[in-house]
Amino acid sequence: VRAIDKRWDPAKGTPVFTINGKYTTRGWTEWTQGFQYGCAILTYDATDDEQLHELGLRRTIDHMAHHVTHIGVHDHGFNNLSTYGNLRRLMIEGRTPMHAWEMAYYEMALKASGAVQASRWQGIRVEKPSPLSANSTQLGYIYSFNGPHSLFVDTMRTTRILGVAWQLGHKLMHENDKAADLLKRLVLHGLATNQYIVFHGKSGHTYDVRGRTAHEAVFNRNDGNFRCRSSQQGYSPFSTWTRGLAWAMLGYAEELEFFQTIDDAVFEDCVGLRKKDVVKVYEQGAIDTADHYISDVTSIDGITYWDDGAPNLHKLGDWRSKSADPYNDHEPVDASASAIAAQGLVRLGNYLGKKGAKYTQAGLTVAKTLFAEPYLSTDTKHEGLLLHSIYHQPNGWDNVPRGRKVACGESSLWGDYHLLELAVYLKRVAEKGPYLTFFA
């Protein structure tokens, strides 16, 4: 964390992933800057190193304000909960001194971010309500940076920012002082994702595998109708891009935990749907995606390749029955997907209680693999923490080391951040400390 901060010039962009062990930028959107400073804050959380808290705090103040008001992305939960959200949480937990104006600063940033994110809203035409979306007559989504036609699976983890802003009493104001409820938009987005992004094995199509996720759903903005599924970073719309699957797993599990804190009557008044009906759908999304991860897309050690439909995956033979091989010659592993998924699994297991034992065990199995070589970096000259992360395989953005045939051995800021977050989460559970949540 310190080494990257020392040599990195923010004027050159945001570090995204490593090439030959050194972090470099990759222009697309600056969605990883919050992870950079969030890594410092999480490491303080785990070690009590005051210098790291000060580093995360200073960099958040100096560089994160434009992310709060960024109207062009779907990444607010990534950038702003990793920074302002974590700093607020630590203050509420008593880990850092309580200063009223500092708390007000964090909460103003989170309120504004949640409202700005919610403003990227498009409605969906609902001709026939579906049980996949709690039979709601209203649906909509926070659209991706691709434009108003585009719903991304990634956003299931960024919509948390709406929940925090709502919890803080905020709302999005429109013309003529009309207010949009942030909890309602969070919920309708999740319902739309379950209906149009997550597959549930309910049709005769060969690609309709229960729990599979597409990267993107595309809508006709002239009439609001769903048109098709698509993919940007996966192999196809009908295979599972495993990081997208992981975003859905963790997003649904965390929001189920959040819903437990909301009174049923308050929920229904804000959303217009019964809480138990919404929870049923979210549980379906969480369980179906988790089961797909466990049964279909991982190797026996819990590590995924970048897509379960990757064209050369068959050359690895029965890859599900053996440990993943990040140094193979055919398809890359994506350990960052596994780090995100592991937290989703253990959170779902905790939420379900005794019924969730298999998810808890699966998540711990993934974590055990990740916190050891060859996934945990032990090279002091390598700037990454979690090795074998993949950003964009179809575009060929990831580094293929000399002498290798596929990308391997590199790190990403989202991979490093989510490995640290997984470590903090598990440390607190093991020590019976405060349960780690995005809401406080």
Image: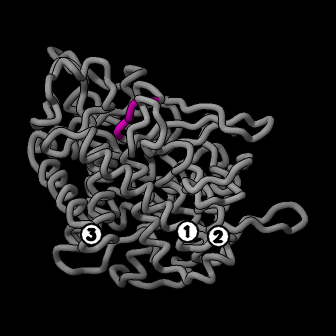
Residue tagged by mark 1? 277
Q: Residue at x 29, y 45 (%)?
A: 293
Assess whether mark 2 and mark 3 are in contact (beta carbons under 8 angstroms).
no
Q: Callout 2: few (<14), some (14-19), or many (20+) C-alpha neighbours within 10 Å? A: many
The image's mark for residue 273 is 2
Please tell me whether mark 3 sits on a helix, a strand or a loop: helix
Q: How is the image coloured?
A: one colour
Where does label 3 land, which residue?
355
Mark 2–mark 1 distance (CA, rounded to whole Å): 7 Å
- Give the mark, 1 or 3, whose residue is nearer the N terminus: 1
- Does 241 lie within the magenta span? yes
Name the mark on residue 11.
none
Q: Which residue type carries mark 3?
A: Lys
Residue 208 point in image, percent of width and height: 43, 36
Q: Position of residue 156 (x, y in %)?
A: 49, 53
Instruction: Report the residue at 59% width, 69% height from top.
Output: 165
Q: Is residue 291 left or right of residue 219?
A: left
Q: Assign a secondary structure to mark 1.
A: helix
The residue carrying pointer 1 sits among few (fewer than 14), some (14 to 19) or many (20 or more) residues within 10 Å by Cα, namely some
Which stretch is magenta?
A: 238-242
**Callout 2: helix, strand or loop?**
loop
**Rendered view: 250 above or below 30:** below
* Residue type beneath disc 2: Leu
Q: CA distance from mark 3 to mark 2?
A: 26 Å
